[in-house]
Image: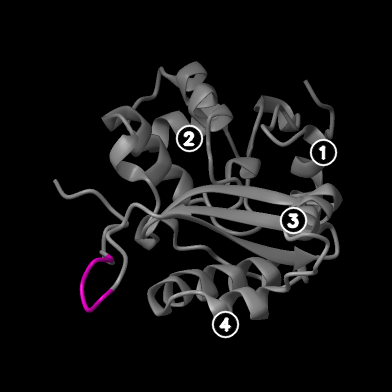
Amino acid sequence: MARPGRGFKPGSAGESSGETAWRVFYDTRFGRGILAWRGGILMEHKLPAPESKKSAVARSGGREEPFGKMLASSKPWQRRLAAPVVASLESYFAGARVDFDAMSLPLDFDSLTNFELDVSQALAGVGYGNVLSYGDLARRSGHPRAWRAVGSVMARNPYPLILPCHRVIRNGGKLGNFSSGAEWKQRLLNLEGVRLACLETG
């Protein structure tokens, strides 16, 4: 079975060989987020943080590098890949309802085991403003007894929000853990209008 997210392959018409590492930043009221790419594959998404903007400016020698300027100086295939993802992320953090079609994006699915891919595909189907438990996600992924292993996959998710692990909570409405911190998990759910009966962490 073909892996998802492989619709675009750089390397033709003078494009990159696919191995170049590059980054794109996006700005929100919470700070600056980062998208890290290798060639045509998105390798990592980091949620916004105020310090991310400061470090980006420091790397540029103290000059501000707004997304529009960065995009204008990048290669056409990079602009084609990054612009829709950045626009969706910025719209989401501005309060718009955005549903990321993660399985059609050029994510690094080739590095996943079959189990991790099953979980990722099930997770991608959890829509905006919805939550489910780790056990629910295990059942949806076709591995009903593997809820602990599902939690481990969530902890290693390199694409928070794009693959919406913040929508997976513990039984009884408890918030549960999140790789970017429980405060971020609650913030994302609040943005989506989710109000849990019990917002305990742990």
Element type at mark 3: helix
Q: Nearer the viewer, mark 1 or mark 3?
A: 3
In the displayed structure, 91 sits above or below 197; it is below
Q: Which mark is residue 137?
A: 2
Q: Residues within 10 Å of mark 1 (few under 14, many from 20)?
A: few
Say what amino acid the circle numbered 3 marks.
Ala
Mark closest to the chain's N terminus, 1 or 4: 4
Query: Is 13 a magenta residue?
Result: yes
Q: Residue 72: which disc? A: 4
**With respect to residue 159, does 106 lie above or below?**
below
- Residue extending farthest to the left is 1
Q: Which residues are magenta?
A: 10-14
Q: Residue at x 67, y 73 (%)?
A: 67
* Camera-side mark, 1 or 4: 4
3D distance between C-alphas at marks 1 and 3: 39 Å
Q: Which residue is mark 3?
A: 56
Q: Tell which circle, 2 or 1, labels the residue nearer the N-terminal end.
A: 2
Mark toward the viewer: 4 or 2: 4
